[in-house]
Amino acid sequence: MNAVPEGGAEVPRAPRRRPRLRLINATVSRGGALFLGALPFAAVAVAYLFASAQRLAVNPSDKLLPSPAQMWSAFLDLATVPDKRSGDLILWADTFASLVRLFAGVGVATLAALCLGVAIGFIPRVRAFLLPFVTVVCVIPPLAMLPILFIALGLGETAKITLIALGVAPVMVRDIANRVMELPPELVAKAQTLGANSWTMVLRLVLPQVTPRLITCVRLALGPAWLFLIAAEAIASTEGLGYRIFLVRRYLSMDVILPYVAWITLLAVITDWLLVRLSHVISPWAHPVQDK
Amino acid sequence: MSRIVVHGLEKSYGDARVLERVNVTAEAGEFLSLVGASGCGKSTFLRILLGQEQQSGGVVVVGDQPIVPQPTPQRGIVFQRYSVFPHLTALQNLLLVEDFRSGGPFGRVFGVKRRNARQEADTMLERVGLAHARDLYPASLSGGMQQRLAIAQTLLGRPQILLLDEPFGALDPGIRVEMHELLTELWSEHGMTVVMVTHDISEAFKLGTRLLVFDKVRHDPQFPSAYGATITYDLKLDRKSRASARDVAKVAAMVGTTRLDSANATAAS
């Protein structure tokens, strides 16, 4: 660049147009991000409303694409009107039954992941003993074991909870074990020079360090956990969100199925958000940027 | 008490020999600076002293016992990186020392012990100039502050031998000089034996009471890893008078450093 003349007459002017940046460098403003993020939702909603209105115009008793009003009234019925036979509020009874199964299954898996994962990752003898086994169990398709579980454990809650736990635990165990093995050897050596033994290192070094990863693990495991839950409920159950969807499928009750799917999605999103908050509360050190 | 005797030490990884015929005796209270070209095995030597790695042959005696092949509170360590626990604040990092030492199965001390530990930790934080950062996590401390914390933590463990693996290698020159002063003060207060690995020859001359150069004396052009490094030069230093320019140049030539200018500058200043 040339030096500015003595008189200072020529001050570089801001360019009229913003320079064209490469795609990967063009950042998005907060409002822009909100708009872009809302776009796919809006697109799906508009497409549905359009298609539904068209079908209902041709045949007012069409069941495949019910109008929002129809869905809302069906959903409200399930949520507020007691069932004639059992006297339950069906939506809440289903939700409660499903969430108990889901959290019991994921809870058992999390506990297993923590105990086995830390042991496999931290203690060479346990690693030699269990890692090959866990690696093999990991590749068994859990749904293929569902008949075995129903035969062996009966059709009750145990089989469903076991399916969820067996379905998500092996991956979680391996992930936690890997995370423990990735701990910097410097930290482990340093802890020992400060007088730690294997157990106190687990308590004060390994557990706090893997907690954020464990929470991420649970977040990722909840996806497959819902899958196994709904599969188990579809096959043998008398209540539950998955059971209800597969029950009303026989009557083509899209006005129930669609709100139920949306409800499950909402539950999953809330759970995920709560887990993120939990991670911030338990391990503030792992989220330095967001907390500032 | 904290004497180190190394006799006929060897270390190989498979066919590759890293160290061979290493003999050295360090008296209690000495400050050993270890220098050598990259990959010459000086860090391996330090890790053997730490107990993180086991020698392939030879004897290492620390105090009056052969070395246990695992880290113990007898030997403290400060690494270049990962030297403090990222999930604990500065204060908690220092409290952890007492928690590990006498916390029992919970790994945590309670009551009077905890109050005493807190007091000791606060004094130490003050001592290394980190009182204002006591409740910060290491991620929000600068590199120099993290290393000060690491040194404070290691010293609270009251080791007989302090091992330093390029502790100031990642720091800015100005901060480095500060750290040299702090380390010198703490060393004269606590009087432990220090073994420091460094790339910086001027640092080695400035801090050490004795300087050891690691290098290979035998070479096999067909199989470069056939022979390991050993101690090729053992120089007593007087911390009060500055090192002669000739010594500095000689060591720099042995190490093959590119920092000869800075090394000479130190000797001349």
Image: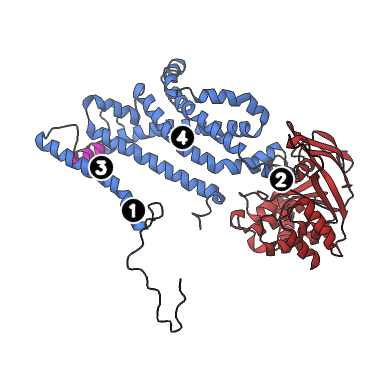
Furthest residue to the bottom? A7
Q: Which residue position holds label 2?
A: A190
- Give me the chain that's red: B
Report x, y in % for residue B167: 71, 53
Q: CA distance from mark 3 to mark 4?
A: 27 Å
The answer to the question of whether label 2 and label 3 lie on touching residues, with beta carbons closer than 8 A, is no
Task: Judge from the rendering whether residue A271 lies leftward or rightward of residue A132; answer left or right.
Answer: left
Report x, y in % for residue A147: 42, 17
Q: Which mark is residue A44?
A: 3
Residue range in magenta is A67-78
Report x, y in % for residue B158: 80, 51
Q: Which mark is residue A34?
A: 1
From what the image shows, is residue A85 above or below residue A269?
Answer: above
From what the image shows, is residue A239 above or below residue B203?
Answer: above
- Give me the chain that's blue: A
At 37% across and 56% down in the image, what residue appears?
Answer: A28
Q: CA distance from mark 1 to mark 3?
A: 16 Å
First in residue order: circle 3 vs circle 4: 3
